[in-house]
Image (cartoon, rainbow, N blue to C red):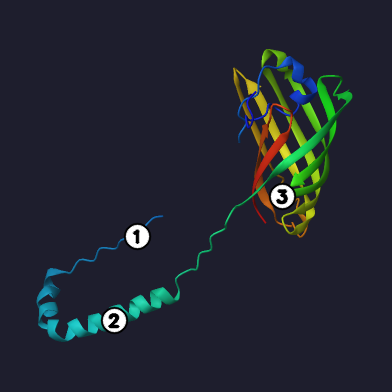
Amino acid sequence: MRPGKPERLPFLQGLAERIDGGRTFALVAIGVAAVSVHPALAGRAVARTGSATGEASQSGIAQRAQTDAIKPISFTTVTRIAKGTFEITLTPSPAEIGGAVDRLDFTKTWRGDLEGTGSGVLLSCGDPKAGEAGYVAIETFDGRLGDKTGGFAFQQLASMHGGSQSLRYEVAPGSGRGALEGITGTLQLTIDDDGTHRYQLNFDA
């Protein structure tokens, strides 16, 4: 595998030797009003043209000023990027639901813009060797993101089917704590030839 190539599904780290190379997992309308003038009023409108022109001009200015005064203010949220690496340790645990669902417990050490530790649970089902499987995982993070200290949780949903693979890896809504309360974001993973796990977290906090 070449450096920087997206990593294979994380649960394959526990079942990794059975799977071929990794693949990508990623994860105003304008209203216009038309006004018509009744023919009976057309002559009267023409007769008042001289005085009405000035009045209309002043009225138009006043209306525009009023519209500008109540125009809603819009705010743009800037998404930031955090990058770094992490180390993961997977521990097989007894299967769940009568042995139909495999379970892996794991811990992580994060370095880079995310600095801290985490732990989680991963549940998988299917036949990875045949390319038909899926998993869900939930994990916590405690530490520092940039200059903010706190914690939050990640959630993962992944599947492989018919030769394609997909992964949603995102901050669990409402999970932020401390200075990271309210954080949202998505995470992308890559794995180097030497096994180094690299992340890019696109977030708002």
Q: CA distance from mark 2 to mark 1?
A: 20 Å
Name the residue nearer the viewer: 45 or 140: 140
Q: Nearer the viewer, mark 3 or mark 2?
A: 3
Q: CA distance from mark 3 to mark 1?
A: 46 Å
Q: Secondary structure at mark 1?
A: loop
The answer to whether the residues at label 3 and label 1 have Cβ atoms under 8 Å apart is: no
Q: Position of residue 27 (x, y in %)?
A: 61, 36
Residue 86 located left or right of residue 78? right
What amino acid does circle 3 point to?
Asp
The image quadrant of residue 8 is: top right
* Residue under the point 76% across and 26% down: 11
Question: In which quadrant will I find the N terminus?
Answer: top right
Q: Which callout, 2 or 1, points at the residue further toward the start of the chain? A: 1
What amino acid does circle 2 point to?
Ser
Q: Nearer the viewer, mark 3 or mark 1?
A: 3
Q: Which mark is residue 113?
A: 3
- Decide: few, some or many residues near mark 3? Use Cα within 10 Å; few <14, some 14-19, many ≥20: some
Q: CA distance from mark 3 to mark 2?
A: 56 Å
Residue placed furthest toward the right? 94
**Which residue carries the number 1 mark?**
31
Q: Which mark is residue 40?
A: none
Q: Which callout, 3 or 1, points at the residue further toward the start of the chain? A: 1
